[in-house]
Structure formats: structure tokens, C-alpha cells
Image (spheres, grey):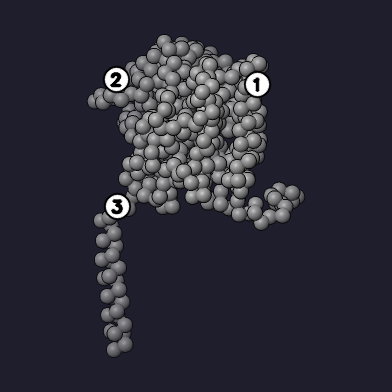
């Protein structure tokens, strides 16, 4: 009798559990904003696209710190007024390679555009008291490229003085003082950007393209955001062929500078190793308007595009390949990649270590044997993610800048931890002194 009475409630519970499991099996809980990613790689729930946008306060810096650099001779009448959405100039078309370091411009433009239209990840707030983070619109990369970029030019002093003046502005800000700069976002994508006083902003969230020129104590994945370079070649918008594999007769393509420093010395070694192949194009070239056009054509005609390290582990060429829908072949032992919390690059890229790439014939043979079916899968995956690498104005949901702001949003818990600990600790970073 006891057994029968106990069995009935258990049966009811079992039926209810089955009903609930069937109900939830019909609901797709995955974010539609990242359909390319497998479930294990999707956004954590705390930073899903449906969460409130990141609230950003932007400092009203004089134009000489940003768009004023577009003019060779600044106009004194508006040099001290901050730029606004009504008079934001477009990025100069004739900027050449300066464009690849223009992330700072697009981040500022995204804040000037509006307040989170279309579900974007960021909204500009005019009240600094309600901000999550503070954006510093200093074009440090453009400043280096504009004011004596050979580092010995006397005009380099202009870059140094801008940095000195900016540090004074920040130190006088109670919001900088309150956090020690931890909740401030500062783009510096050129390896030599902010080079004079960089250590004085090393607590901030730095937007970098890699860590090739930074010590670990200054820049690292825990606090900083890795950005793509702004691509230089035109995006392949009409890549709708029914036979993508056959329409790209060249196996492997590279066009660029072959004399580089640090890990980039591999480029000179590859010059000798990749000559003599009919299906490989490896050419020394400098970035001119004509050269960029030829690179655009070459990437769109190739199955794989080679990305060896440059002076630093990354280069613009990787992102040129992505928007050209040419499968990247990445040769770098130290590269960091943008948005890697969300995007699995192995689904559309091939990776070789420097040691593997320098084995005679190894890399080319591996690519020749690469299955066509797998290549087509990667090509489709590449097309599905290429919009994440577009810098544009007006900004769009899940474009490159929107993705960057989402990565900044991920830093908020660590920012709060750092600020709260700094306010109570009598001996900052005491654990580093332990032996």
C-alpha cells in the first residue's frame, strides 16, 4: 500500500518534467545576433545584445586633438571647439595607409551619431555621473602619422605637446581622479601611438591591434580591447558566384612589404621559399593607390591569402583578406585577434607556426591538399562574419565599432573591482611584492 502511494506522486513529477523539457526544446534561446557561432561560443548572458547599451561619456576635447589634424593648417577660429554631429568631417579619402589606424575616428563618430539606434551596443550620455566609461577622443595614431612620423622629425614635438596637454586635462578631471583612469577608453592602434607618455595612461582600457610594442604591465587582454585594423582594400560586396572555388584560380596570394622587424623578418625568408610556384603570388610592394587596386584584384582571385607577421604580430592585410572573402593563412606565433570571445577564427582561417611555415614546401603542400568541400565551408563562414570588420558611418549594429563597444562592456566587472580595491587598499598591488 505504501509503495503504490509513493509511486503515484513520482509518476506525476516525471510527467511534468517531460512536459517542461519538450516545451523548452521548441524555444531557440540562442542570440540571433551571433548565428555563426556554435552554442558554446555565443555571448555570455551578461553581455547579450538585449542588455542595456554601454553608457559612454565623451570628453569635449578641442579639435586639434582629433579632426583638426585633417587640415594641414588648422583654422584658429574653430580649433578649440569640440566637434559635433553636424560638422563631423568624413574620413579623408586621400589618407592612404593612415586609414588603417583610423579606429579612433570611427569610435568617436559612433558616439556622435546618436543614442543607441537600432539596438547598438553604445549610447552617448551627456551627464558624466551616469556613465559606465569615459571616451577620450584623442587621435593618437593620426597624431603620430601627421606630426613627424619618422620619430626624428622636429614636428614630432607637436605630438609630444598634445600628449602633455591631454594628460593635464585628464588629471584635472574628477572622473579620472576617481578611478585612476581605469574606466577611460583610449584608442592607440598605431604601434607608436602615445609613445611619449603612454605609461601614464596604462591603467585605462586601451584599444590596440596587438601587444607587439607593449610590456605586459602596460597592456594585456585582461583590461584592454583588441581591434581590427581598418581595411584598406574595398569590400567584396558582390561575391555571389555559384563556384567560388573555381572562380579563384590562384592558390596563395601575398603583396606587401617584405623587409620588416622583429617577428616580421619571416617575410624576407618566405620571399625565397615561395618563388617558383605557378599557383603562388608573393610580391614585394608598397602601398600606393595602384598597388591597393592590384591587391584587391589579387585577393579576390585567390583561395588563400597569406598573413605573415609585420613589425608587430598583426597587420592590415589580415582584414583586407577577410573583407575580400579570401581564406586567411596566418603565420604568427604571437598574434591576438579581435572579438575572439565570440568568434572562432579556426572556422574561416588557417594557422601555421613560424617554424612550420619555414619548412620548405610544407605550407604550399598543405594548402594544395586542402579539401574543396572544407574550403567552401570556410568561405561561407568568412562571408557571414565579414560585416563585423566594417568601419562605417552611420554605424550599424554589429559592425566593427559596435563589436568593439561590446568588448568594452565586458570589462565593466574588472573595472569595478579595480576601482573598489584601489579605494580601500593602503598598499596598492601588495601581492606583487610577495616572494
Q: Is residue 158 above or below residue 170?
A: above
- Estimate how packed mark 3 is, as few (under 14), some (14 to 19) or many (20 or more) residues with alpha carbons within 10 Å: few
Q: Quadrant of residue 293?
A: top left
Where residue 247 is drawn, which disc sits there?
A: 2
Question: Mark 1 or mark 3, which is nearer to you?
Answer: 1
Farthest residue toward the left?
242
Mark 1 to mark 3 CA distance (whole Å):
57 Å
Residue at 62%, 22% (x, y): give it.
Answer: 158
Quarter of the image with the N terminus is bottom left
Q: Is residue 69 above or below residue 400?
A: above
Q: Is residue 100 above or below residue 46?
A: above
| Residue placed most toward the observer, 205 or 2 | 205
Where residue 28 is drawn, which disc sits there?
A: 3
Question: Mark 2 or mark 1, which is nearer to you?
Answer: 1
Q: Quadrant of residue 87?
A: top left
Where residue 222 is drawn, which disc sits there?
A: none
Residue 219 visible in the snapshot: yes
Farthest residue toward the bottom?
1
Q: Earlier in the sequence, mark 2 or mark 1?
A: 1
Name the element at disc 2: loop
Residue at 64%, 40% (x, y): give it.
Answer: 171
Name the element at disc 1: helix
Q: Quadrant of residue 173?
A: top right
Q: Position of residue 12 (x, y in %)?
A: 27, 75
Mark 2 to mark 1 CA distance (whole Å):
51 Å
| Residue placed most toward the observer, 344 or 47 | 47
Mark 2 to mark 3 CA distance (whole Å):
37 Å
Q: Earlier in the sequence, mark 2 or mark 3?
A: 3
Residue that mark 1 sits on: 157
Farthest residue toward the front?
77
Q: Position of residue 255 (x, y in %)?
A: 46, 16
Question: Mark 2 or mark 3, which is nearer to you?
Answer: 3
Amino acid at each position: 500500500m505504501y509503495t503504490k502511494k509513493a509511486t503515484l506522486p513520482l509518476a506525476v513529477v516525471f510527467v511534468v518534467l517531460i512536459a517542461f523539457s519538450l516545451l523548452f526544446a521548441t524555444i531557440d534561446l540562442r542570440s540571433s545576433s551571433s548565428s555563426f557561432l556554435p552554442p558554446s561560443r555565443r555571448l555570455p548572458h551578461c553581455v547579450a545584445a538585449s542588455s542595456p547599451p554601454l553608457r559612454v561619456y565623451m570628453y569635449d576635447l578641442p579639435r586639434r586633438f582629433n579632426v583638426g589634424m585633417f587640415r594641414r593648417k588648422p583654422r584658429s577660429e574653430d580649433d578649440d571647439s569640440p566637434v559635433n554631429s553636424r560638422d563631423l568631417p568624413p574620413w579623408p579619402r586621400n589618407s592612404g595607409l593612415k586609414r588603417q589606424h583610423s579606429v579612433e575616428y570611427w569610435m568617436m563618430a559612433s558616439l556622435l551619431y546618436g543614442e543607441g539606434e537600432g539596438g547598438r551596443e553604445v549610447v552617448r550620455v551627456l551627464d558624466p555621473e551616469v556613465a559606465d566609461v569615459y571616451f577620450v577622443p584623442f587621435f593618437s595614431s593620426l597624431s603620430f602619422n601627421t606630426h613627424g612620423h619618422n620619430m626624428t622629425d622636429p614636428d614630432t614635438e607637436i605630438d609630444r605637446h598634445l600628449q602633455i596637454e591631454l594628460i593635464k586635462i585628464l588629471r584635472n578631471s574628477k572622473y579620472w581622479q576617481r578611478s585612476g583612469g581605469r574606466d577611460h577608453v583610449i584608442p592607440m592602434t598605431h604601434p607608436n601611438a602615445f609613445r611619449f607618455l603612454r605609461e601614464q595612461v596604462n591603467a585605462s582600457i586601451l584599444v590596440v591591434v596587438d601587444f607587439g610594442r607593449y610590456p605586459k604591465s602596460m597592456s594585456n587582454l585582461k583590461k584592454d580591447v583588441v581591434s581590427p585594423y581598418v581595411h584598406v582594400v574595398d569590400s567584396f560586396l558582390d561575391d555571389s558566384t555559384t563556384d567560388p572555388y573555381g572562380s579563384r584560380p590562384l592558390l596563395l596570394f601575398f603583396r606587401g612589404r617584405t623587409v620588416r622587424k622583429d617577428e616580421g623578418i619571416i617575410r624576407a625568408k618566405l620571399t625565397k621559399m615561395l618563388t617558383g610556384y605557378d599557383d603562388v603570388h608573393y610580391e614585394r610592394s608598397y602601398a600606393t593607390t595602384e598597388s591597393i587596386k592590384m591587391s584587391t584584384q589579387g585577393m579576390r582571385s585567390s583561395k588563400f591569402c597569406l598573413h605573415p607577421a609585420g613589425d608587430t604580430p598583426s597587420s592590415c592585410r589580415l582584414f583586407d583578406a577577410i573583407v575580400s572573402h579570401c581564406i586567411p593563412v596566418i603565420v604568427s606565433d604571437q598574434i591576438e585577434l579581435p572579438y575572439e570571445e565570440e568568434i572562432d577564427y579556426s572556422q574561416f582561417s588557417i594557422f601555421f607556426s613560424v617554424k612550420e611555415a619555414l619548412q620548405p614546401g610544407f605550407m604550399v603542400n598543405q594548402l594544395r591538399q586542402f579539401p574543396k568541400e572544407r574550403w567552401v565551408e570556410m568561405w561561407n563562414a568568412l562571408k557571414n562574419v565579414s560585416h563585423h570588420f566594417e568601419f562605417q558611418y552611420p554605424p550599424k549594429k554589429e559592425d566593427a565599432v559596435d563589436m568593439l563597444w561590446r568588448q568594452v562592456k565586458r570589462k565593466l566587472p574588472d573595472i569595478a573591482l579595480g576601482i573598489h580595491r584601489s579605494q580601500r587598499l593602503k598598499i596598492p598591488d601588495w601581492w606583487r611584492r610577495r616572494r
